Amino acid sequence: MITIITNTNINTGTEAGERADGRASNELRPLKIEAGVLKRADGSAYLELGGNKILVAVYGPRELHVRRIMQPNRAVLRCRYNMAPFSVDDRKRPGPDRRSVEISKITSEALTPVVFLEKFPRSTIDVFIEILQADGGTRCAGITAASVALADAGVPMKDMIVSCAAGKANEKIVLDLSEWEDKEGEADVPIAMMPRTGEITLLQSDGNLTPEEFEKALDLAVEGCKKISEEQKKAIIARYGD
Ligand code: UDP
């Protein structure tokens, strides 16, 4: 879509107080989630959020042969977040980097609290998150899609983790930052939570916010998570029925 900027706010790409893509401050980008898209994985999901396109494959629970990380009384949940070389404007060098290692780690930590890992001693559950196209907020979108793929794999969980970011861009607290808002904005607060209890399993903060702004961003991110959670459930119902 081509946006024609008619005022002098060329640098910010927005009319005063309005978001560049025309969204309200509490509005998510268009969201689509589909479960069970890969026939060879035990569970899978495909998610689009704005321009993000993300594919997740889950394998397991299955026996873990790596003794160094094997746990005698529970499974381990291994997550790998990977950006395809063609997913971003400047070609991404293939393979892990500092950022993807960090996102893999926080994804695993965000999902682990809901999974009944103790049911599968000496096992692993492997989650592969492939970013096919990135448009800001990929860590949250990846976590949301991973939850659906875990549910699709039949992994027992006490809730389906959902993730969303809010932050500050163009002096306003806004939900679900676009790539431009993420890069040029003042702050980004990605969260993940258990929708049933409201427990937060991921909370990051990048940039500067006053305590009041932080509270507002957190409330907005929780509101976004609740909306996305409904779409996760719909994706599972569309595949398996009620
Ligand atoms: N991005 C990029 N090249 C990279 C990493 C990220 O163009 O090597 C873009 C991508 O659109 C991503 C956004 O920058 O979604 C914001 O990245 P960040 O590290 O804040 O993570 P995210 O918001 O995706 O969770």
Image: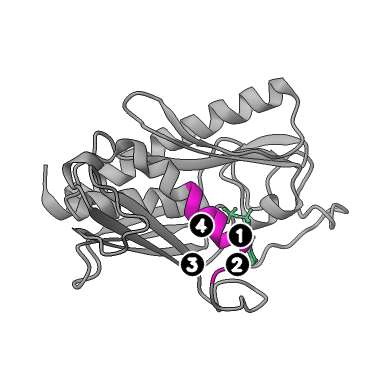
Whichever of callouts 1 and 3 sits on the residue coming sooner in the sequence is 3
- Horizontal and vertical percent for residue 83? 52, 69
| Three-letter amino acid code of the residue under disc 1 | Arg
Whichever of callouts 2 and 4 sits on the residue coming sooner in the sequence is 4
**From where the camera sits, is residue 30 visible?**
no
Q: Residue shown at 69%/56% (left/top)?
A: 180
| For discs 2 and 4, the disc positioned in front in the rendered view | 2
Q: Residues within 10 Å of mark 1 (few under 14, many from 20)?
A: few
Q: Are marks 1 and 2 in contact (CB under 8 Å)?
A: yes
Relative to 57, say whether 210 is above or below: above
Image mark for residue 50: 4
Q: Which residues are magenta?
A: 96-106
Q: Residues within 10 Å of mark 4 (few under 14, many from 20)?
A: some
Whichever of callouts 3 and 2 sits on the residue coming sooner in the sequence is 3
The Cα–Cα distance between marks 3 and 4, rounded to whole angstroms, is 19 Å
Q: Are marks 3 and 2 in contact (CB under 8 Å)?
A: no
